[in-house]
Image (spheres, rainbow, N blue to C red):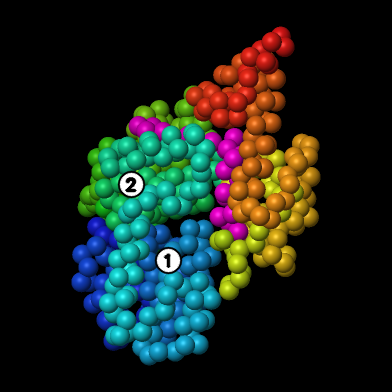
Amino acid sequence: MDPTPDRARFCALLVAPPGPARDALRALLAADPRFGVTEAPDGAAARERLADGGVGLVLAHAEAGGLDVVRHTHRLRRPVPATVVADKPDVRAAVEAVRAGAADFFVLPGDADRLKAFAASVAAAAGADPFRGIVSRHPKMLDLFELIRDVGPTATTVLIQGETGTGKEEAARAVHAASAGRTGPFVAVHCAAVPETLLESELFGHEKGAFTGADRQRIGKFELADGGTLFLDEIGDVPPLMQVKLLRVLQERRFERVGGTEAVRVDVRVVAATNQSLRRLVRTGRFREDLYYRLNVVRLDLPPLRARAEDIPALVEHFCRKYARPNAPPKAVAPGALERLVAYPWPGNIRELENAVERACVVHAGGVIEPDHLPPEVSRAMTGPVPTRVDLTRPLKDVLRDATAQIEKRYIRRALRKTRGHVGRAAKLCGYCRRSLTAKIAEYHIDRLAFAARR
């Protein structure tokens, strides 16, 4: 078994024991030039491979614990489409697979053509929408989408800045999905989570015998990302010596493994992210200025969730679908609960919101999330009642949209009152750019001069 996929193509993970079943799956995908294939004999090996990232589709054989693999793919921070494959028809197994979250259940060889069509549709969808993992209608986010579309096809290095939990990895994946190397791997390294003594080996790999415990050659993340994108999260925590080595790799596109002398050349697009101000770190001498300018070719500044409150209803609906119980419809959200979710400032941003919705979905029975199902700090976050009439003749999403509009309009009016009608200062309070706030003022027919008259 060769566990390394062809990095120039969309990567599919085949989970099957060695033998005819795995050979049949490999042959089926080999006929489509879009696919690269990586393989795992069982669920444990599959989980390790999925942890490395870059997998866009999982085909799990029933004999290799296919149900457990499918369940695992849905617990990932970014779920991966997965299906179960079997050698003979089994209605009960098919039902269990779908309940576990499988996209479908295939029997080979009879379903070979249908399986090929399914895999092709997943690959096509992966290349069609680089923003499928991001839920937003905020003007600033829409501007960022346009910037990603522009920079995506280039090889330009991108720096993403934003608070913890704002979706920096999702933005990096969008850059990758919009790039010319989108069928190559996306490999993420969380620099702050790797001990300083191991970071060099993690990034560049090492040769056998390079240090105590190095009993075999290890391929680093730069090599694993060859032909694709390497995402360096929390780049501001990289120690000074490693900053020098990173700068060299970005300039020369080559490096040596730890303990090695042979230069390894790679074609990798680097996307870096940080929740700190790198410019401030440069001023204090904690980050190299030359590396900062090498990374900061194009910068994406992600707004915090409190600055894009109109996205909260759509995000809540998305998470309710994501954490729906098997074979059950997604939970609805009571208007009172939504009011509290919109009013809360979310210091942990989207990640904190997702955790709150997930807990409400899995802990509480019933089909509706009520205010008392939310974390205490969220349920207390009310700035005043927003009257919302429950009209069962209208779809819930329309009611939620109207409730959000009421809150947004009231927030903008309060910001204009505080700034005495000054749009620029009010935009800063709202977390909008001036152009976006001007559009909102027009949309809600707010007379800003009425606030200016109160000087």
Residue for point 53% across, 76% down:
99
Does residue 206 appear in this view? Answer: no
In the rendered image, residue 386, in percent from the top left (x then y), is placed at: 75, 40
Above or below residue 8? Residue 165 is above
Question: Which contiguous range is marked in magenta?
Answer: 296-320
Q: In this rendered view, identify the residue nearer to me: 280 or 319.
A: 319
Does residue 90 appear in this view? Answer: yes
Q: In this rendered view, identify the residue nearer to me: 34 or 390.
A: 390
Q: Secondary structure at mark 1?
A: loop
Binning the other alpha carbons within 10 Å of mark 2 as few (below 14), some (14 to 19) or many (20 upward) gives: many
For disc 2, the marked residue is 178
- Earlier in the chain: of badge 2 and badge 1, it is 1
In the rendered image, residue 264, in percent from the top left (x then y), is placed at: 24, 51
Residue for point 48% across, 85% down:
93
Q: In this rendered view, identify the residue nearer to me: 405 or 276.
A: 405
Characterize the magenta stretch by its predominant secondary structure: helix
Above or below residue 116? Residue 9 is above
Binning the other alpha carbons within 10 Å of mark 1 as few (below 14), some (14 to 19) or many (20 upward) gives: many
For disc 1, the marked residue is 81
Label 2 is placed on what type of residue?
Ala
Above or below residue 305? Residue 81 is below
In the rendered image, residue 288, in percent from the top left (x then y), is placed at: 41, 31
Q: In this rendered view, identify the residue nearer to me: 187 or 261.
A: 187
Q: CA distance from mark 2 to mark 1?
A: 19 Å
Residue 54 lies in the magenta stretch: no
Label 1 is placed on what type of residue?
Pro
Residue for point 35% across, 74% down:
14
Residue 308 lies in the magenta stretch: yes
Quadrant in which the C terminus appears:
top right
In the rendered image, residue 335, in percent from the top left (x then y), is placed at: 71, 50
